[in-house]
Amino acid sequence: MTGIWNKGKELYLKYREQINYLIVGGLTTAVSLATYWLSVNTVLDPKQPLQLQAANVISWICAVAFAYFTNRRFVFRSREQNRLKEAGKFVLSRLTTLGMEMIIMGLGVSVLGLPDKAVKLVAQFIIIIANYVLSKLLVFQKKVGNGE
């Protein structure tokens, strides 16, 4: 049993960033989906294109706020002192993927007539991958020579 535990620990340490990103990404997706679901089941009508996008933006804002703090702390373990600059890059990268998501939602729901919640779920998988790449390459860059 100890051998399995040690192997699991070794794998976790080797892929810590990716594993933590999947966990945080899953939690961020849950925040996004819950906020979206709450919006369209209380005050917004997903059959109306503007209200569909409003629900999408509201869920995005909640998810981005959650994602910045959890990615900074648990995934990329950022030590960037200029948090405003870092948060700005994070929001800019997430605005890029919001645009991608809005296109996916608009095409899937408004053009193809697919169920909004199913399209939202599919879009989330695409967005999780894009967000990781942008966060890794543009936002939470490790400084060369910082010992990590």
Image (cartoon, grey):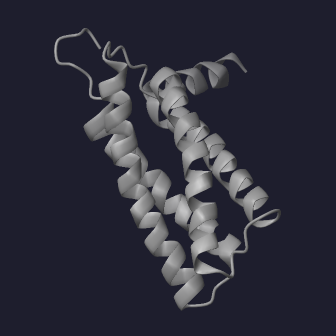
Q: Assign the C terminus to one quadrant of the image.
A: top left
Q: Give the camera-side residue of 45 and 139.
A: 45
Q: Is residue 42 above or below residue 119?
A: above
Question: Which residue is rendered at x = 71% and y = 52% of the image?
Answer: 35
Image coordinates of residue 23 in percent, x first then y, are 60, 38
Residue at the outermost left position: 144
Q: Is 129 rendered above or below residue 104? A: above
Q: Residue at x 55, y 82 (%)?
A: 108
The front one of 146 and 115 is 115
Residue 28, horizontal then vertical, whole percent: 61, 43
At x 57%, y 74%, the residue is 50
Q: Is residue 76 left or right of residue 19?
A: left
- Whole-percent x, y for residue 55 in the image: 64, 62
Q: Quadrant of residue 20?
A: top right
Q: Position of residue 41 (x, y in %)?
A: 81, 65
Q: Is residue 80 above or below residue 63?
A: above
- Decide which of 20, 143 is in the foreground and name it: 143
Instruction: Give the camera-side residue of 140 and 61.
Output: 61
The quadrant in which the N terminus is found is top right
Furthest-top residue in this view: 147
Q: Of all residues shown, which one is farthest toward the bottom?
A: 112
Residue visible at 58% across and 44% down? Answer: 63
